[in-house]
Image (tube, rainbow, N blue to C red):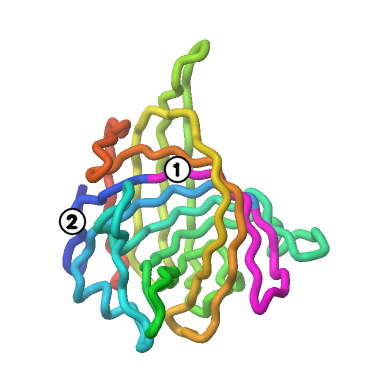
């Protein structure tokens, strides 16, 4: 694993691969529905670097347990297969690809962990729910091979080149596993508009690929190179 241009991130704690059906709501008004595939990299990042991304009124809240225990920063790679408005019409062409930086936080006076989007790189900068989107050239490649009922071997790579410069490049090879199903509801805030949040209610089918605290490792290889200035 190579290091970012400014500082460095320690080895990630966990990787979660998920196929997500999600809907976002603001003030309980349906905004959109999506079906997407996500790859999450969870890091134990330097406290000072994380604090710089968190606005007043919030504090970073590292995961206290589970496969992400100790992580305080997520890189979320999103391949949006369907993106629809409340009437079921395609939004921004009906598809998108994006990479988001996310920090688990607690709001002042609350013990509830919510999530704060710190950066968003997306193929269409008009997709800007959190007011921090940057347009980027984004490509994803995926290949899976398997025989009979054996777990498939998969390879995946992403290239994200923001218009502001630099690149996020990630590639990995891993063994797939039967995903687990769960339903969740989470609140996600913006670091530039901290009074604004979206509610996501979703069903996900997820597989844990690697976790240091969980002692899980189905990853054969991983390379991550981050050179975006921020």
Residue 223 drawn above or below residue 55: above
Residue 115 drawn above or below residue 108: above
**In magenta segment, residue 204:** no
Q: Main secondary structure of the magenta part?
A: strand
Residue 131 in view, yes or no = yes
Residue furthest out toward the top = 148
Callout 1 environment at 10 Å: few (<14), some (14 to 19), or many (20+)?
many
| 149 left or right of 58 in image | right
Residue 40 image offset from top left, x and y in percent: 40, 51
Query: Which is more N-terminal, label 2 or label 1?
Result: 2
Q: Residue at x 39, y 65 (%)?
A: 101
Q: Work out whether residue 100 or residue 19 is closer to the camera in this orientation and state it.
A: 19
**Discs 1, 2 touching: Cβ within 8 Å:** no
| 183 left or right of 15 in image | right
Q: Quadrant of residue 185?
A: bottom right
Residue furthest out toward the bottom = 56
**What are the residue bounds of the magenta stretch?**
16-34
Residue 57 image offset from top left, x and y in percent: 38, 87
Residue 163 in view, yes or no = no
Q: Quadrant of residue 166?
A: bottom left
Q: Quadrant of residue 217?
A: top left
Residue 1 image offset from top left, x and y in percent: 21, 47
Callout 2 environment at 10 Å: few (<14), some (14 to 19), or many (20+)?
few
Q: Which residue is mark 2?
A: 10
The answer for how far apart the CA atoms under marks 1 and 2 are is: 20 Å
Q: Which residue is mark 1?
A: 17
């Amino acid at each position: 694993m190579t290091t970012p241009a400014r500082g460095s991130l320690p080895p990630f704690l966990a990787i979660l691969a998920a196929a997500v059906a999600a809907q976002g709501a603001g003030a309980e008004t349906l905004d959109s529905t999506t079906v997407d595939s996500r790859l999450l990299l969870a890091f134990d990042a330097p406290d000072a670097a994380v604090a710089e991304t968190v606005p007043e009124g919030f504090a970073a809240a590292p995961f206290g347990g589970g496969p992400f225990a100790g992580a305080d920063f997520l890189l979320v790679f999103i391949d949006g297969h369907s993106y629809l408005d409340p009437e079921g019409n395609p939004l921004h062409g009906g598809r998108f690809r994006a990479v988001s930086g996310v920090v688990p936080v607690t709001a002042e006076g609350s013990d509830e962990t919510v999530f704060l989007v710190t950066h968003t790189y997306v193929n269409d900068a008009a997709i800007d729910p959190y007011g921090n989107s940057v347009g980027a050239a984004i490509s994803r490649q995926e290949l899976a091979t398997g025989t009979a009922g054996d777990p498939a071997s998969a390879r995946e790579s992403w290239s994200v080149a923001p218009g502001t410069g630099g690149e996020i490049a990630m590639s990995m090879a891993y063994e797939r596993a039967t995903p687990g199903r769960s339903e969740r509801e989470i609140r996600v805030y913006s670091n530039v508009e901290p009074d604004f949040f979206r509610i996501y209610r979703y069903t996900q089918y997820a597989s844990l690929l690697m976790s240091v605290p969980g002692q899980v490792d189905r990853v054969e290889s991983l390379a991550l190179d981050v050179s975006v200035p921020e």
